[in-house]
Amino acid sequence: MLYSCTFVSLLPKPASQQPLRYVLLTGLLLVLFLSGCKSASTPTQAPMPAQPQSQASESQSQPQAQKDIDPGSASTSSARSDEEIIADFDAELDASIADFDGMILDERAKAEAIEASLGGDDGGANSGVLGGDSGGDGSLFEDGDIYEGLPGYGDFPESADQGDNESDGQQASNESASTTPSGDASHSESAAESNTSSPGGPETTRRGGIPEDIEGGSDDDIVARQIREAALKEKDPALREKLWDEYRKYKNQQ
Amino acid sequence: MINSARADSVRINSAVCVLISLLLTACNAPIQVKSTTYTPLQLENKEIAEAELLDLGVLAFDPGLDNLSDEQADIVLPAVRIAEGHYLANQLTRTLQDSAAWGAVRVLPSKEVVTDIYVEGIILHSDGEKLTLGVTVTDTSGRQWYQRSYSQTASKYAYERRKSLQRDPFQGLFNRIANDLIDFRRTLDGKQATTLRNISTLRFARDFSPEAFDEHIQANRKGVLDIKRLPATNDPILQRIQRIRERDYLFVDTTQEYYDAFSLQMEAPYQSWRTQNYDEILAVRQLKRQSRERTIGGIVTVIAGIVAAGSNSRATRTAGAVAIGSGALLVKSGLAKKGQAQIHIEALAELGQSLESEVEPRTVTLEDQTITLSGNVQAQYQQWKQLLQKIYALERGTPADISDDEQTSQ
C-alpha cells in the first residue's frame, strides 16, 4: 500500500522533463517493490519445541548461521530435531535411572548390614527361625555359616567317641545327609565347602559332644538315628553342627 | 407323723446329695484337653510357565485395634499389635515363598505398589495362646478372590525351646493360608494368569503415562479392570516404562530387606513374650474358672444350708449349719482365686509393656525407613512421569503440550 501511494504521488510529474529521473525512479520503485515482496515471502521464525534444560543453553550458544535455515528444508530439520530431543530425554532418563539404582543399592546395603549385624549378635536363634519357618526350605545350613570364623566360638571339645575312624565318620555323615528329607545337593555342597572352617553356632553348649537341646534319642526312627550317629562320629565341628541342625530339623518335622 | 419323718429323711438325703455334688463340682475342675493339629504346607510340584507366574504382595496386617473386646483392651497394647502386624505379614510372606507356587512374594509398604495378587490381613486375636487372622485376597484387576478367617490355638509344646527354634508356633495357620491361595490359584487357567500379569503391566504403565495407556484398560461397572487392547511389544514408551518397573521391583525388594531386618530384631523378644503370655493366659483362665465355680458353689451351698437349717430334724439343722460354713469358705476361696487371676492379668499387662518398650523403637525405625524410601522413590517417579509425558508428546508430534507443560512448571 505504501509503495502504491508513493507510486501514485510520483505519477503526475511530466515524463518529458526528466526522463533519466523517471528511469531512476522506476528502477527504485521496482527495487523497493521486489524487496517488499521478498520480505513478505520470508518465513517467520517457527516456535522452538521444548528442550531439556541441559540442552537449552547449548541451543542458545549455537552460531547464528544455523538459524538461517533454508526454507525448503525446514520440515526435515524439525523432525530431526525432535529425534534429537527425544534422545536427550532418553539420556536424562538413563542418568536418573542410574542415580536411582545407586540410591537403591545403598539402601539395600544398609539393610543387609543391619541384618548381618543382628544375625551375629543374637546367637543364631533368630536366623534359624526365619530360615526354617515352614518346614521344607533349604536354609538349614545358613545358621552355622554366620558364625564361622567369629571370635568367641571356639572348637568343640573332643568327645571320646569321636574320631576313632575319621574316614568312616565322614562317609557316614555324607550318607546321612543325603538320606534326610531336606538334604539336597546344595546342602551337601555347602557342608563340604565349610569342611575346613570352624565351629558351629553358640546354641550348642555341649555335654559329651551332644548339644544341650538334643534329647536322649530314645524315640528316634531309623533316619533320625543315622543322623545322630553321624553327628556323634563327625570330627569336623562345622559339619557336625550342621548335622545336629539337620537332626533338629528332622525331629521337628515328625 | 410317719409321713413327716419320711419327708425329713428325703429332704436330708437330697440336701446332702446336692452338697456333695456341689462340693465335687467346685473342687474338681475339669481337666482342659487341648488338641492341636499342624497343617503341612502344600508345595506346587507342577512347573508354572514364566508368563503365568503371579507375583504376590502381602500388606502389613491391620492391627485390629478397633475390634478389641473390653477384656482384650486391658491387655493389648497398640504398639505391640502394630509390630505384630508387620511381623506376621513377613512370616506369611516367607511361607508363601516356600510354597514355590508364586513369582516374587514380598511385603508391600502400600497397596499403591503394583503387583498381581494382594493379600491383606487383620489381626482379630493374638495372645500367644491363640491367633486369629482375617485374610482378604484380591487380584490386580480389583476382583476379590475370597475373604476368610483363620484361627489356631498353640500347643504347649509349640513353645518348647528346641521346637520354637525351627518353627513359628502358629506355622500351621500360615500354611493353611498359603494352601488356600494355591488351591484358588489352581482354578485359574494359563490365559487368566497371563491376563492378570498384563493388567499389572498396563496399570503400572498407565500410572506413568496415562495419556498413552489410559484407554488400554478400563474398569467395568463393578470396578474390575479389563483389558481393552494391548500395546505393541516394541512400543517405545512401554519399553521405557518396563525399565522403570524393574526399578520398582528393586524398591520393593529393598523394603523387603527392611521387613526382614525388623523380623530378625523382633523375633527373640516376641517369642519370649508369647511363651510367657501363654502361661499367664492359661493361669488366668484356670483361676477365673475356679473362682466362678467356687463362688457359685459356695452361694448355692449356703442357700441349701439355710433351707436345711429350718428343718425340724436336728441332724438336718446340723448339716445345714455345716453347709453354710462350707459355702462361706467356698465363696471366700472363690474371691481369693479371683484376686490371683487379677495378679496374672496385671502380669500380662506388664509383659506387654516390656515387649512394647523393645519393639516400639524398631517399629518406628521400620516405618521411618519405609516412608523415607517410598518418599524418595515417589519423588523420582514423579520426575520420570513428567519426562515420559514430554517424550510421548514429542513422539506424537504435539510439542505444544511440552511448552505448555514447561510454562506451568516454571
Image (spheres, coloured by chain):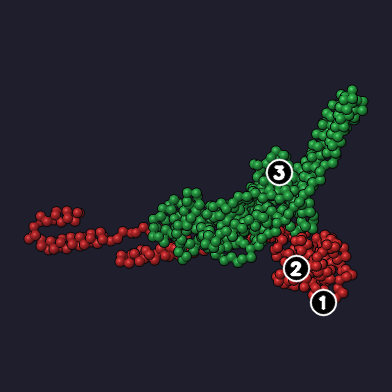
Q: Position of residue B131 (x, y in %)?
A: 70, 49
Q: Nearer the viewer, residue A118 or B110?
A: B110
Circle nearer the viewer, 3 or 1: 1
Disc 1: host chain: A
C-alpha separation, residue under disc 3 versus residue under disc 1: 57 Å
C-alpha separation, residue under disc 1 versus residue under disc 2: 20 Å
Q: Are marks 3 and 2 on the same chain?
A: no
Circle nearer the viewer, 1 or 2: 2
The residue that label 1 is drawn on is A167
Classify residue B349 as left or right of residue B191.
right
Mark 3 lies on a secondary structure that is loop
Q: Are marks 3 and 1 on the same chain?
A: no
Residues at circles 3 and 1 in contact by the CB criterion of under 8 Å: no
**Disc assigned to residue A42:** none
Classify residue B49 as left or right of residue A160.
left
Q: Nearer the viewer, residue B318 or B131?
A: B318
Disc 3: host chain: B
Classify residue A254 as left or right of residue B5.
left
- What colour has chain A? red
Q: Position of residue B223 (x, y in %)?
A: 50, 50
C-alpha separation, residue under disc 3 versus residue under disc 2: 43 Å
Q: Position of residue B213 (x, y in %)?
A: 46, 57
Observer able to see residue B296? yes
Which chain did the image draw in green?
B
The residue that label 2 is drawn on is A180
**Disc assigned to residue B77:** 3
Observer able to see residue A110? no
Circle nearer the viewer, 3 or 2: 2
Q: Nearer the viewer, residue B72 or B245?
A: B72
